[in-house]
Image (tube, coloured by chain):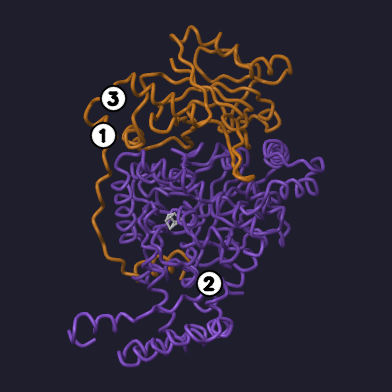
Amino acid sequence: MSARDAILAAVRRAAVPQVALPEVPDAWPAVRAGTASGADLARRFSEVLEQVGGTAVELNGMGALAAAVADLPAARVARESGRGIVSSVPRLAISTLVIGPDAPRARLDQVELAIIPGRMGVAENGAIWVSEEDLPHRALPFVAQHLAIVLPRGEIVADLHAAYRRLRPPLPGYGVFISGPSKTADIEQALVIGAQGPKSLTVFLV
Amino acid sequence: MNHSKAAAAFLADQPRVSWHDQAVWAVRAKRDLQAHSTPGWERLREAAAGIKAHTMGRLADYLEEFEGNATRNGAVVHWARDAAEHNRIVLGILRARGATRLVKSKSMLTEECGLNAFLEANGVTVTDTDLGERIVQLAGVPPSHIVMPAIHLRQDEVGDLFHRLLGTPKGLSDPTQLTAAARLHLRERFLACDAALTGVNFAVAETGGLVVVTNEGNADLGITLAPVHIASMGIEKLIPRLDHLGVFLRLLARSATGQPISAYTTHIHSPRAGGELHIVIVDNGRTAQLARPAFRRSLHCIRCGACLNTCPVFRRSGGYSYGYVLPGPIGQVLAPGADARAHRDLPFASSLCLSCGDVCPVQVDLPDQLYRWRQQLGDAGLLSLRKRAAMKVAGWVLARPWAYERTAKLARWALRVWPRRVLAALARPYTVDRELPEAPAEAFRDWYRKHRGRGPAL
Ligand code: SF4
């Protein structure tokens, strides 16, 4: 018997009683009651984002974006050191490095700052859904030394239940909720920002 | 070595014990803050437990559904009956591509399978990329906690280790600087790796997708940079639908570290362009545990570590005292299932305070299972001679009121007149860390007779 068949047969032999699937609990009470407005959600999102080590920047429309990005410390470092800036945000053509699906790893390692679109924000945990459909290479949000995400203010939902109601299958080949910069507390529980991935996360709310 | 002996070794260093206790308790406190500020927390736990119970009842169907969907998405699904088969499959995938440099993110399953040692013996260089895991790997020891692998080490010990093996300056022990050094070291490994291996937090039957959760981004770096991704998962990682992730992910990080969610929650549905995705589904004793009605709920576990952090025994005895790949309450109920004789003392290393059951986000009935293991190990004749003899005598005495009365009288008399030293010696090992009580002036039985006359016969 193949390992597959042996395992499936053993699972069936275990004869675990069948019970009905419970309902998935509904979203935040505040939202169910219809009391959380879009502004409330954006405010909560920004608060939690700061708690998890990120920075929220409110912008008045996409017009202000280019200047705001140029102002980031990481953009300055990139300009001075000759390291790369990569944008995959439509109409933000400020890339100084070409990254495609076949980009060699050494080139990916040159990315100082990546600016990418976020599809949805989650107020309860400051997470942003990033889909590979918006990335020139899957590794971009992780190899960059610093990450900026552009998120439409109107795309913030209350909690993960609401988020998964929007993320209906099929999902992209690669999709990730990013909540804050890379972090660790593995040495004596001391929180250190910038473990293996980006050392900072800036979210531009537009 | 049994748990109490191993714990004694840890307890010999009292300052470290206090520090370990407080560091771990702080994580429990952070978990409480999150649990108390999340509306409907108990309903979430119930839903999570219900979804798991449902999944286990139809696990074979969900495994088949998952396999079909994952295959359609472009993954290759492998099945392994045990650790050895899992390790052979992984080596086979690597060999077929001439891969010799593997980066690995956290996976308790591969610890269970002893994968690192097996691969290293077969010429593969394995780099654990989670910082805590890398630290214990460099130190040559297993993780001492399932979420915080190096929680037992002090920063100066990590500093010494990095000085010896990574060339950081002598005496450097600042966590920020040590982390920066590890970042550079690991970045080199990521850029040069041939394959990446990750664990799996959840596998979604409905979509054939995998969810992997990290704070450091190390799993993502490996998966997105390496041409080959191998994901190792136990059969119990299945959940039926995508929207069930909302329930589990809201519980997981809050219970594990007191974060509202981990920094990276990655959903993998297909390999990267031109790359490969292999999923190894492992049994290794899980179907046996599933067939034990009294213990099958231990398979609901989502490895958050909350039961370790809250456990008064774990906090003061350290992860290594358990002698099993998973320490703490969850390890104590899984270990006897893996090898009852070797781990027969583990279910007794508990005060049955019930705290583990209260914090568990998926309502594993840990205290009940600890209690049930005690009965079953006793029935199977696996307890030590001393414990068996003591139980026999106690059982005989407690079943006979007259014998109990006489024994109690003798004990009160002995407590009053015998030298303490002699009594303590007789009552070892109970008295190693405990004082014997003062003898009460009067037995309850006597008091009752005096005040209630004859009353019902006692
Ligand atoms: S048994 Fe429960 S509390 Fe313990 S690690 Fe598993 S999920 Fe967490």
Ligand 1 visible in quadrant:
bottom left
Q: Residues within 10 Å of mark 3 (few under 14, many from 20)?
A: some
- Residue with the mark numbered 2: B434
Q: Left or right: B27 with respect to B138?
A: left
Q: Left or right: A158 with respect to B377?
A: left
Query: Which amino acid, mark 1?
Result: Pro
Cα gap from disc 2 to disc 1, whole angstroms? 50 Å
Query: Which amino acid, mark 2?
Result: Arg
Q: Nearer the viewer, residue B434 or A62?
A: B434
Q: Residue at x 22, y 80 (%)?
A: B451
Assign a secondary structure to mark 2: loop
| Quadrant of image for the C terminus of chain B | bottom left
Subunit ID for the residue under disc 1: A
Question: Could one spot residue B88 in this view of the protein?
Answer: no
Subunit ID for the residue under disc 2: B
- Residue with the mark numbered 3: A36
* Number of numbered labels in the structure image: 3
Q: Residues within 10 Å of mark 1 (few under 14, many from 20)?
A: few
Give me the chain that's orange: A
The lab-note entry on whether marks 2 and 1 share a chain reads no
Query: Which amino acid, mark 3?
Result: Ala
